[in-house]
Amino acid sequence: MRVAIAGAGAVGRSIAQELLENGHEVLLIDKSPKAIKVEMVPRAEWLLADACEISALDDAALERCQVVVASSGDDKVNLVVSLLAKTEYGVPRVVARINHPKNEWLFNESWGVDVAVSTPRLLSALVEEAVSVGDLVRLMTFRQGEANLVELTLPEDAPLGGERVGSVAWPRDTALVAILREGRVLVPSADDTLEPGDELMFVASQDVEDELAELLGAR
């Protein structure tokens, strides 16, 4: 898979390293000469250019990319890159970084964003997840499908404790995707039981979160 990353700062370089380790082709784009640190990610392609300009994206051959990641520290830049990638080059998957929570409402399909990642929201959610048992915590929003990744750690008195996954009448548009138990990641099957202390990871439609929380006995 070919991936273009607009923004070659610490975040962009870290993403590039991970993708390269997983066997993908990566192009890093940044308009600041100070950000072009080829020695830090030598296996990536590098382009010194303004990713908000069509000529730069032509040079990047964005039409050959399956994914574009807008990872700069400027929300305006990330929105423009996302919109150009989707509308001008037909990139199938556009992921955008949100730097300021007040701008979160803009990062949707109207701006070409398939998945928006809010760093402040994610950090606060992870803090909540670390200290909360029995609370439904939203970790990430998938804008294209209006669905969320949510987590709940089952408390000792959970009403579903000991129940089989397959016997639970989960709300519509809800999928239990993983159970984290004693350091292990379990892919749920119908015969697995739900145990107190399990961290349950769901992908669920936003409009059924309250119903899911009630079913799980969340506070």
Image (cartoon, rainbow, N blue to C red):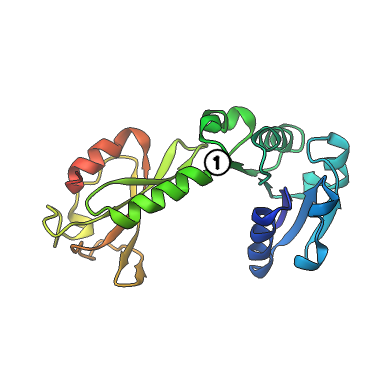
Q: Please tell me which residue lies in front, 42 or 87.
A: 42
Q: Quadrant of residue 82?
A: top right
Q: Residue at x 29, y 59 (%)?
A: 199
Q: Position of residue 68 (x, y in %)?
A: 69, 46
Q: Residue at x 74, y 52 (%)?
A: 8
Q: Residue at x 20, y 61 (%)?
A: 194
Q: Please tell me which residue lies in front, 35 or 214.
A: 35
Q: Please tell me which residue lies in front, 169 or 79.
A: 79
Q: Position of residue 170 (x, y in %)?
A: 24, 46
Q: Please tell me which residue lies in front, 149 or 174.
A: 149
Quarter containing the N terminus: bottom right
What's the amino acid at mark 1? Ala
- Count of residue discs: 1
Q: Position of residue 19 (x, y in %)?
A: 65, 62
Q: In what element is the residue under mark 1?
A: strand
The answer to whether 38 is drawn above or below residue 115 in the figure is below
Quarter containing the C terminus: top left
50 to the left or right of 130: right
155 to the left or right of 181: left
Q: Position of residue 208 (x, y in %)?
A: 30, 36
Task: In the displayed orientation, state which residue is furthest to the bottom.
Answer: 183
Which residue in the structure is indicated by mark 1? 116
Q: Residue at x 40, y 53 (%)?
A: 126
The answer to whether 210 is drawn above or below residue 29 in the figure is above
The answer to whether 117 is drawn above or below residue 9 in the figure is above
Residue 94 visible: yes
